Amino acid sequence: MAPFQFPDPNVATTVVNSETGETWVYVDGVWEVKIEDDDGVVIGDDIDFTHINNQLEQLTAAVTSLQTSIIEMNSRVSTLEGDTVLIIE
């Protein structure tokens, strides 16, 4: 990947990195990534909502799986409580 060079902000205040597709804007003396949320509103920092949403979906699936496991274990414990167990030492 070739290094990305920002243009002179006196010439252009918006530039697109052709390799990553990111749009950069020059705001208050600093180059920032231009981010749009789902409503098309520009957000001034570099939050990756796609990554966050993917992580949230994975965590939700993990919690659901754990809840199912707990329910199954509780059912097994209830079943075993009614059984007589003989321990031979």
Image (spheres, helix red, strand yellow):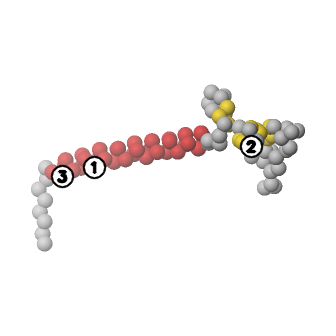
Residue type for callout 1:
Met
Residue type for callout 2:
Val
Residue topped by disc 3 = 80
Residue at figure coordinates x 81%, y 40% from the top left: 15
At numbered mark 2, what does the secondary structure look like: helix, strand or loop?
strand
At numbered mark 3, what does the secondary structure look like: helix, strand or loop?
helix
Q: Residue furthest right?
A: 11
Please say whether residue 48 is visible from this viewpoint: yes
Please say whether residue 24 is visible from this viewpoint: no
Sooner in the amino-acid sequence: mark 2 or mark 1: 2
Disc 2 versus disc 3: distance between alpha carbons? 66 Å
Sooner in the amino-acid sequence: mark 2 or mark 3: 2
Residue topped by disc 1 = 73
Residue type for callout 3:
Leu
Residue toward you, 85 or 21? 21
Give the numbered dot on residue 63: none
Disc 2 versus disc 1: distance between alpha carbons? 55 Å
Q: Please provide percent x and percent y for residue 6.
A: 82, 46
Q: Please provide percent x and percent y for residue 11.
A: 88, 38
Residue topped by disc 2 = 30
Residue 27 lies in quadrant: top right
Residue at figure coordinates x 66%, y 36% from the top left: 44
Task: For label 1, count other residues whose C-alpha is less than 10 Å away and answer few (under 14), some (14-19) or many (20+).
Answer: few
Which quarter of the rendered picture does the N terminus lie within?
Answer: bottom right
Q: Depth-wise, is mark 2 or mark 3 nearer the camera?
A: 2
Residue 6 located left or right of residue 41:
right
Q: Please provide percent x and percent y for residue 17.
A: 79, 44
Task: For label 3, count other residues whose C-alpha is less than 10 Å away and answer few (under 14), some (14-19) or many (20+).
Answer: few
Residue at figure coordinates x 62%, y 41% from the top left: 47
